Image: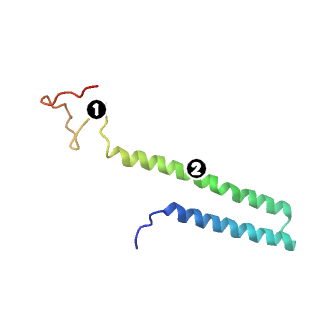
Amino acid sequence: MTPDRNPLQGVAATVTKVVGVVSAALTALVGWGVVTAAQDDAVIGLLGTIPGVITMAGTAIAAFQTATRGEQHVTPLADPRAADGTPLVPDPTVPPLAP
């Protein structure tokens, strides 16, 4: 199985299809008199919150993933240390960079 280059597009397409099918089914049920218009409005309103919740969760996950994965690749300026814990010190043979 090859990794998907654009996984978010697949998720967006799936969510759009599910919301569309549910909305169409509710509209049909209202037309047949099985569901009242007020119930239809309530469910459609609930379905409208799904993209917001997904966006909120995705943003939180992305922020934590960025912080977690980024820390492994960045040397802190306050107390720089090598992977084994030894302090990193400037090389005295290298002249400082000009501002």
Q: Are marks 2 and 1 in contact (CB under 8 Å)?
A: no
Identified at 25% across, 26% down, the residue is 98
The residue lying at 75 percent from left, 69 percent from top is 24
Q: Which residue is label 2 attached to?
A: 56
18 relative position to 89: left or right: right
**Residue type of the residue flagged with mark 1:** Asp
Image coordinates of residue 11 in percent, x first then y, are 55, 63
Circle 1 SS class: loop
- Specify the farthest residue to the right: 33
Total number of numbered discs in the rendering: 2
Q: Quadrant of the N terminus?
A: bottom left
Disc 1 crowd, CA 10 A, few/some/many (<14, 14-19, 20+): few
Image position of 43 (left or right of 76)? right
- Residue under the image location 23 percent in, 28 percent down: 97
Where residue 73 appears, x then y in whole percent?
A: 31, 45
User: Which is nearer the eye, 8 or 87?
Assistant: 8
Label 2, label 1: how far apart the Cα atoms are: 34 Å
- Location of the C terminus (image quadrant): top left
